[in-house]
Image: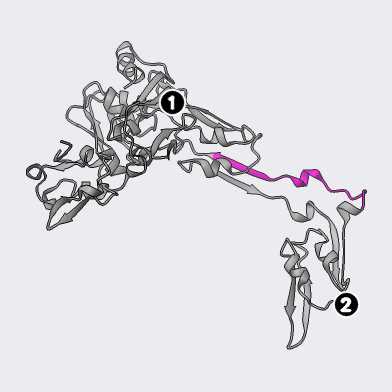
Amino acid sequence: MNSITREGEENRFLTHKNDKCVGCGICASICPTESIKNGPVLPIARGLVDMDYINIDKNNCCLCGLCASACPFDALEFKINEQDLKEMEEYPKWIKYAEIDTDACVYCKACETACPQDAIKVARTLPKRENLVLGEIDVDQEKCINCKICEELCPGDAIKVKQTGRETFETVVNEDKCVYCLVCKRACPTDAIKAVCSSCAYQDIKLNPEEFKTHGNTVLNPDSCVNCGWCQEICPVKAATVIKPFEGEVSYDEDMVCKGDSCHACQDVCPCNAVIISEGRSSIDPRFCILCGVCANVCPQNGIHINRTKMNLENIRSKSWQNRLSGLTVGK
Amino acid sequence: MPVVIDSDKCGKIDNCPGEGLCIKLCEQGALIEKEGNVILIPENCDDCDLCIQNCPNQAINKV
């Protein structure tokens, strides 16, 4: 890990967390002392070399904290007298965030499956089957010929013919699994099954709709979230809201010869799973792109361009900080 | 056009800072190791240029 400490009237500390870094190079491009150099991003992402995504020149770094303020992945931690820059009033604040409205969430797990950073965990408790459907079922063993027709037909895997002796069998219903669909009863060749769905047959059956609900808890871990927007786009009930770190668009050189599947460098480094390779070309889905620019860094054709129009960072300290940061929003 | 390896700049794989990184990056089998050297199989090269971009010795080029 790259860390720098400098002690004087105040103690300043900067450290790079490689596990959160993606090698986008934003820090390197804004560093006022040019003390940050990107490593070989693609070989690192593919696990071919054991290096950090960036290297900070400890002798040259002025410990201003600009890099830590601008890193959209919170991969740089900057402290003055043990206090983190993000907690200090005078330092910039990101407006980016991701949030899941737990009141609106139906715990479908679509976001958990889609999140490229595994930042979302859904825990849920399903309603009990006996609270959803009521009924009765009984097999008359005298009439039953243990033909297994019911066993093969049962959609709930709730009825089984068991061998109890050399020539004896028993047909047994698992009432925890049975939903009284009556398939077995109707198919039984000897009319051995007596079953009724009380919920269908009797109007006065009272089930409590409160007990039909799935309960749960959806937790988004802000430490691993990259604000890519997958949860927001995929949520069927619009329970997720994401504000990305940058606004703008990605473009490709019109005459670029993209090698698609042969190269797939952009896809390998994208932290947002925003790159699609089809018909031999890569394309970036703007719904999921956060404009970090790591794809542009690794494209061997230099054919990807990041055109940021706005950085969702406010409370910029000074004109000189603003000048450095404005370099991120003029395209590259 | 397949890539060209400058053997003076390349040197042996033992001396490569990337320990033969180009071979590991090439998924087309166009770069292979032979007796400690990187050998190009031109017919396998797909011109993705990943080796050019990532060679720590800048030993791979296009003519």
Q: What residue is disc 2 on?
A: A143
Q: What residue is disc 1 on?
A: A245
Place residue A55 in its image quadrant: top left
Residue type at mark 1: give it. Pro
Coordinates of residue A8 in the picture (x, y in percent): 22, 25
Residue type at mark 2: give it. Lys
Place residue A102 in its image quadrant: top right
Please state the chain letter of the residue tagged with numbered disc 1 in the rendered image: A
The quarter of the image holding the C terminus of chain A is: top left
Is residue B1 in the magenta section?
A: no
- Region rendered in magenta: A202-219
* Pointer 1 or 2: first along the chain: 2
Residue projecting furthest to the bottom: A166
Q: Nearer the viewer, residue B33 or A219?
A: B33
Alpha carbon distance from label 1 to label 2: 71 Å
x 77%, y 47%: residue: A211
Q: How is the image coloured?
A: one colour
Query: Which-is-in-front pick, marks 1 and 2?
Result: 2
x 26%, y 52%: residue: B29
Asked if residue A81 shows in the view, the reply is: no
The answer to whether B51 appears left or right of A84 in the picture is left
Is mark 1 in CB contact (under 8 Å) with mark 2?
no
